[in-house]
Image (cartoon, helix red, strand yellow):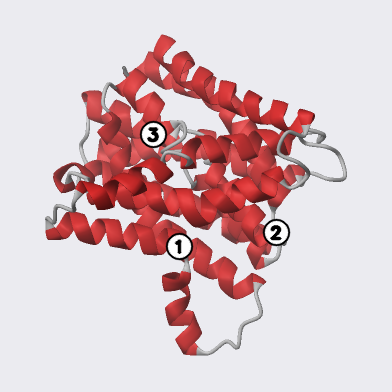
Amino acid sequence: MSGVLSGFAVIFVVIAIGFALGRTRVLGEQGEFVLSRLVFFVATPALLFDSLAHADLSVIFSPTLAVASATAFAIGVVYFVIARTVMPRPVPEATIGALAASYVNSANLGIPIAVFVLGDASFVAPLLLFQIVVYSPIALTTLDLTTGIRSGSWVQTVTTPFKNPIVLAGVAGLAVAIGGWTLPAALTEPFRIVGGASVPGALLAFGISLYGVRVLQRGVAPRREIALASVLKIVAQPVLAYLMGRFALGLDGHDLFAVVVIAALPTAQNVFVYASRYQRGIVLARDTALVTTLASIPAIGLVAALLA
């Protein structure tokens, strides 16, 4: 439990700094906008390329990958279907909501929690791979095609994923890892340095966005959607991860504990960055990230008490 609290403390401190920046206007009126674009177009692609280029493929392609990918995709589909049929919501908002309900904070919070609670940061690598190489391209392609002015031609549909910097960086990094290539330090070091701004940049932008707003504000926040996304993220996804890991893959002990903890991680701040980039579902992404971050503390504590 102390490891859980330590991991969350790091995150909350950086978010608090972002809130202070927003309150003091140190970065001006466009601070959040500039930081979000910096994270989306520069820092995150650099981080993903550097991380995947040096990844251990034997760790990435493991049972954890199967559980992480299947549960995230299943929960995202459940939210999307409910949002489109029951609520109903436009495709862009339903897509952001699906991400909010299933896109795990594998970097900003996943790495600290993996270190403090699981004892090994590599446990989050499979989920990171799935979200980068598969999940993000699907979601971002959907957002590209439903929020911009498109001709609707098949050429654009096919090439859209390859115009996104995050997708491009993920594919390039994975190609380097699979090819077994060793790049010179003079080439990889700039990616490492710039990529180091991704996690704090996303957290700072998230903190700035919290200033001057009321979370779950009546008439502004889509409360039903936030509640649905939060319950799916903090309750349904860990339960599904346990069932799949225990009964479908036969995991037990520390491996089972790890996949459930990873599934119980909150919504990634990257979802807020994506929402800001496409100007759709911003409040949904912001409030769900905050609600799930707070709720994941007792959730992960409960998982630790039951399975550790």
Q: Nearer the viewer, mark 3 or mark 2?
A: 2
Q: Please give the name of the residue rendered at 24% of the width and 24% of the height, measured from the top-left corner.
A: 254
Quadrant in the rendering for residue 307: top left
Q: Closer to the N terminus: mark 1 or mark 2?
A: 1
Question: Which sits earlier in the primary sequence, circle 1 or circle 3?
Answer: 1
Asked whether residue 232 is in view, the answer is yes
Q: Position of residue 185 (x, y in %)?
A: 22, 46
The residue wearing badge 3 is 262
User: Quick check: marks 1 and 2 in contact, CB under 8 Å?
Assistant: no
Regarding residue 67, the answer to whether it shows in the image is no
Quadrant the C terminus occupies: top left
Q: Are marks 1 and 3 in contact (CB under 8 Å)?
A: no
Residue at 48 percent across and 81 percent down: it is 157
Residue 154 is situated, as x and y percent measured from the top left of the image, at: 47, 88
**Outermost residue toward the top in this view:** 2
Q: Residue furthest front?
A: 186
The amino acid type found where label 1 is placed reads Pro
* 173 in relation to 8, above or below: below
Q: CA distance from mark 1 to mark 3?
A: 26 Å
**Which quadrant of the structure image shows residue 143?**
bottom right
Circle 2 is placed at which residue position? Answer: 279
- Name the residue at 25% across, 57% down: 174
Whether residues under marks 3 and 2 lie with C-beta atoms below 8 angstroms apart, the answer is: no
Mark 1 burial class by Cα count in 10 Å: few <14, some 14-19, many 20+: some
Check disc 1 and report the residue beneath it.
Answer: 165
Q: Tell me the element at label 1.
A: helix
Tell me how many marks there are: 3
